[in-house]
Each structure stands twice: as structure tokens, then as C-alpha cells.
Image (tube, rainbow, N blue to C red):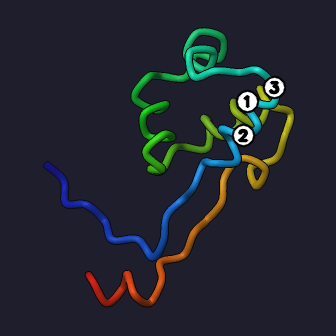
């Protein structure tokens, strides 16, 4: 199993889920209508990284820009001390 990378923050897709809700799009629609793989949907839900092709599909589906659906959250000094 590959060693997990330590990154200086994480991505939040809370904006994505808010935009999906506003447009009546559910996770099942991502799979069925936009052909996003279930594993990728799980990655989004868990706040893990996804590829740019997926971002393009999501932006197309929601008619938005990447910053409208995701946010970078830097690691806090407290979190760095715990590592």
C-alpha cells in the first residue's frame, strides 16, 4: 500500500454540495447523468483530491468555476503540532 502524503491542508467540497442542492442535483445524478465513478464521488465526500477532468465535469454540470465548488483549508498551527 502506498505511503500517504502529508499535505499542508485539505480541500472542502461543502460549496459543491450546497450548489448541487440548490440545483436539485444528487450524488446519484453525478454517477448516472455525468458518469462520475462511485469511487470519485466517495473521494469528494471524504474531502480527498480528485482529478481536473472531474472538476471540469462538475463545473459543466453546475455552470460554475472551480472556486464555486471547492475551498482550500490550510492546516492550522495546532494541527501541525499534533503531527
Question: What residue is disc 1 on?
Answer: 21
Quadrant housing residue 71: bottom right
Task: Label 3: state its secondary structure.
Answer: loop
First reached walking from the N terminus: tag 2 or tag 3 = 2
Q: CA distance from mark 3 to mark 1?
A: 5 Å
In the image, farthest residue toward the top: 32
Against 60, residue 2 (above or below) is below
Residue at 76 percent of width and 37 percent of height: 19
Q: Which residue occupies 73% across, 30% down?
A: 21
Res 23 label: 3
Q: CA distance from mark 2 to mark 3?
A: 9 Å
- Left or right of 22, for residue 34: left
Residues tagged 1 and 2 counted as in contact (Cβ below 8 A): yes
Do tag 3 and tag 1 residues touch (Cβ < 8 Å)? yes
Numbered badge on residue 52: none
The location of residue 28, given as percent across then percent down, is 56, 15
Kind of element beneath mark 1: helix
Please tell me which residue is depicted at 63% across the width and 15% down the height of the picture.
29
**Mark 3 nearby-residue class (10 Å; few <14, some 14–19, many ≥20):** few
Q: Residue 55, percent across and down?
A: 66, 40
Is residue 53 or residue 62 the one in the foreground?
Answer: 62
Q: Is residue 51 above or below residue 61?
A: below
Residue identifier under label 2: 18
The C terminus - image quarter: bottom left
Label 1 Cα crowd, 10 Å radius (few <14 / some 14-19 / many 20+): few
Residue 78 in which image quadrant: bottom left
Amino acid at each position: 500500500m502506498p505511503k500517504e502524503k502529508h499535505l499542508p491542508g485539505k480541500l472542502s467540497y461543502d460549496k459543491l454540495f450546497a450548489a448541487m442542492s440548490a440545483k436539485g442535483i444528487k450524488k446519484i445524478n453525478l454517477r448516472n447523468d455525468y458518469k462520475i465513478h462511485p469511487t470519485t464521488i466517495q473521494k469528494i465526500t471524504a474531502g480527498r483530491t480528485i482529478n481536473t477532468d472531474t472538476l471540469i465535469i462538475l463545473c459543466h454540470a453546475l455552470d460554475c468555476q472551480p472556486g464555486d465548488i471547492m475551498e482550500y483549508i490550510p492546516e492550522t498551527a495546532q494541527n501541525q503540532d499534533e503531527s
